[in-house]
Image: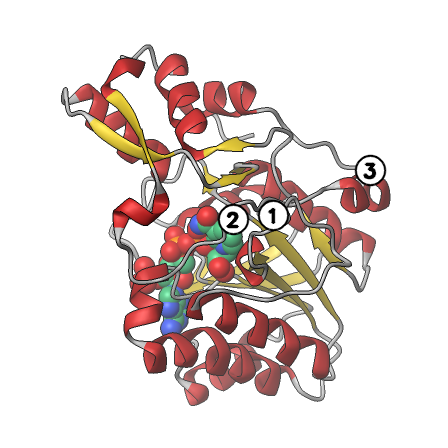
């Protein structure tokens, strides 16, 4: 019988790709704070706010998952800095509610974390390096990792960075912002001092599937095959979508005056996951072409 997988935050950017990747192989229950307007034909779906302890307990007891893929998160980095209580509640208490709801079962938690657990002084980072988050979002993700590692459920933690994909649901899609702005003839400024390896959501969804199948208990990095600055990434996007690269201007992170500090020299080394799961990572042009064609996998 196929495994029963409950997904939290299933109606976000990554959730879309995860549902598509897992749906042919497992019995899914996709959950989110608010059901989206579009039709959800692929699998069972439920409203579940991870901060609502009773709702989480009821939904988990009702579905009885073998695995929870935990994506739900307050992802607005400056928003987390501004409203720390809300961020802690969503990202840490929400995670504890899931751990508590699973207690007594053997269900595994697959948690998606971030390179923002590192300070960005010495990237790309391997799994062995010591976390030292520089902003509150990173602190909540690290606290959630620690809650999972300290709990009784088996777990896998997959750290990733700068996600992009075909989802129409995310308000925070960098690719969509670049494409829409350039198509509308707007000049845009993009930071050239934040480096990492942008990650295609469909590739990460494949890593999530394999980490369920292989039944490991590890911290694993998953990221794209190429490291670049955000400015270079935006130029690659412009080029792939036949838009005018000259409309993109480099700026420094400090000039943005953002509330939350950002790790600058970051990104994630993927050698461990490539070796353990036999996975490949993907170059940016290949993934952007798939995004442009609307192809998910
Ligand atoms: N995006 C990146 O570049 C990136 C990089 C590294 C790691 N990650 C991790 O990847 C995961 C997925 O991120 P994403 O890019 O798909 O972001 P996203 O599009 O913002 O998705 C996050 C989802 O979580 C939901 N959510 C927020 N609070 C919730 C709550 N209390 N209960 C239930 N659902 C809640 C959001 O719903 P609402 O829309 O209703 O708030 C949203 O659907 C997150 O754990 C994030 O930390 C993302």
- x, y (%) of residue 109? 66, 69
Q: Residues within 10 Å of mark 3 (few under 14, many from 20)?
A: few
Display coloring: secondary structure
Q: Taking the image as four quarters, which one is ligand 1 found in?
A: bottom left
Residue beneath disc 1: 22
Q: Secondary structure at mark 1?
A: helix
Quadrant of res 175? top left
The reply to whether discs 2 and 1 touch (Cβ–Cβ < 8 Å) is yes
Q: Residue 276's x, y, as percent?
A: 85, 46
Q: Disc 2, disc 3: CB below 8 Å?
A: no
The residue lying toward the viewer, choosing from 78 and 169, is 78
**Which of 14/223 is in front?**
223
Q: Residue at x 45, y 36 (%)?
A: 165
| Residue occupying image coordinates x 29% and y 55% | 36
Residue 278 tag number: 3
Above or below, 86 against 37 in this view is below
Number of marks in picture: 3
Quarter that holds the C terminus: top right
Per the rendering, the mark at residue 35 is none
User: What crowding class fits label 1: few (fewer than 14 Cα within 10 Å), some (14-19), or many (20 or more)?
Assistant: some
Q: Dot 3: what SS?
A: loop
Mark 2 lies on residue: 19
Q: Can residue 292 be seen in the rendering of this structure?
A: yes
Q: What separation in Å lies between label 3 and label 1 (alpha carbons)? A: 18 Å
Looking at the image, is mark 3 or mark 1 earlier in the sequence?
A: 1
């Amino acid at each position: 019988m196929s495994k029963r997988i409950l997904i939290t935050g299933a109606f976000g950017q990554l959730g879309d790709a995860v549902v598509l990747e897992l749906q042919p192989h497992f019995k899914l229950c996709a959950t989110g704070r608010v059901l989206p307007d579009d039709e959800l034909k692929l699998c069972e779906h439920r409203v579940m706010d991870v901060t609502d302890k009773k709702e989480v307990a009821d939904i988990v007891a009702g579905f009885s998952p073998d695995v929870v893929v935990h994506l739900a998160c307050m992802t607005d980095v400056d928003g987390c800095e501004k409203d720390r209580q809300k961020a802690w509640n969503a990202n840490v208490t929400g995670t504890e509610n899931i751990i508590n709801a699973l207690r007594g079962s053997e269900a595994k938690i697959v948690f998606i974390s971030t390179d923002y657990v590192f300070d960005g002084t010495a990237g790309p980072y391997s799994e062995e390096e010591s976390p030292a988050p520089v902003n509150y979002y990173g602190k909540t993700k690290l606290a959630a990792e620690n809650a999972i590692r300290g709990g009784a459920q088996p777990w896998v933690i997959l750290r990733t960075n700068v996600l992009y994909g075909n989802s129409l649901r995310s308000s925070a899609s960098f690719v969509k912002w670049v494409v829409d702005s350039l198509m509308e003839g707007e000049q845009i400024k993009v930071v050239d001092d934040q480096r990492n390896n942008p990650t295609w959501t469909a590739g990460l969804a494949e890593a999530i599937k394999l980490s369920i199948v292989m039944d490991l208990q590890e911290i694993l990095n998953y990221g794209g095959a190429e490291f670049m600055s955000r400015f270079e990434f935006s130029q690659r996007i412009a080029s792939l979508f036949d838009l005018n690269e000259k409309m993109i201007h480099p700026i420094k992170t400090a000039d943005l005056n953002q509330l939350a500090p950002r790790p600058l020299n970051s990104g994630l080394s993927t050698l461990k996951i490539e070796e353990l799961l036999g996975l490949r990572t993907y170059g940016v042009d290949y993934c952007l072409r798939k995004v442009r064609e609307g192809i998910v996998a």
